[in-house]
Amino acid sequence: MDIRHFKNLPLMGILRGIKEDVIEPLMEIVISSGLKTMEITMNTKNASKLIRKTSKVAGKHLIIGAGT
């Protein structure tokens, strides 16, 4: 996936304070909604770990990033 997807739908989901146990069901909903980009804020506890897990769960369906 590349930046062209974001240009076609310039909307980004932002997750803050998310818990690890909700990532899988939440990503299913996000992906089925058609959203293409998602950010996890770095002030979320264990943000780096959550970003890695979210990226793994979302696969090629979402661009996952870190934010403030």
Image (spheres, rainbow, N blue to C red):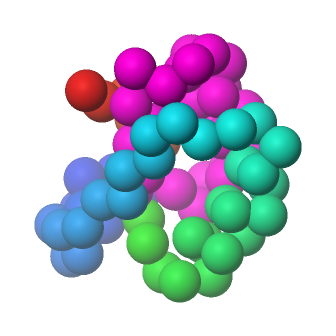
Q: Nearer the viewer, residue 52 or 20?
A: 20
Q: Position of residue 41 (x, y in %)?
A: 38, 31
Q: Can the viewer see residue 3 in this picture? A: yes
Direction from residue 20 to residue 49 in the image, left or right: left
Q: Quadrant of the C terminus?
A: top left
Q: Nearer the viewer, residue 65 or 60?
A: 65
3 vs 40: above or below: below
Q: Position of residue 60 (x, y in %)?
A: 61, 54
12 vs 64: above or below: below
Q: Position of residue 61 (x, y in %)?
A: 59, 61
Residue shown at 73%/49% (left/top)?
A: 23
Q: Quadrant of the N terminus?
A: bottom left
| Residue 28 counted in the magenta span | no
Residue shown at 52%/36% (left/top)?
A: 17
Residue shown at 43%/72% (left/top)?
A: 35
Start-end of magenta stretch: 37-63
Direction from residue 46 to residue 11 in the image, left or right: left
Q: Nearer the viewer, residue 24 or 4?
A: 24
Direction from residue 5 to residue 38 in the image, left or right: right
Q: Can the viewer see residue 56 in this picture? A: no
Residue lying furthest bottom? 33
| Residue 47 counted in the magenta span | yes
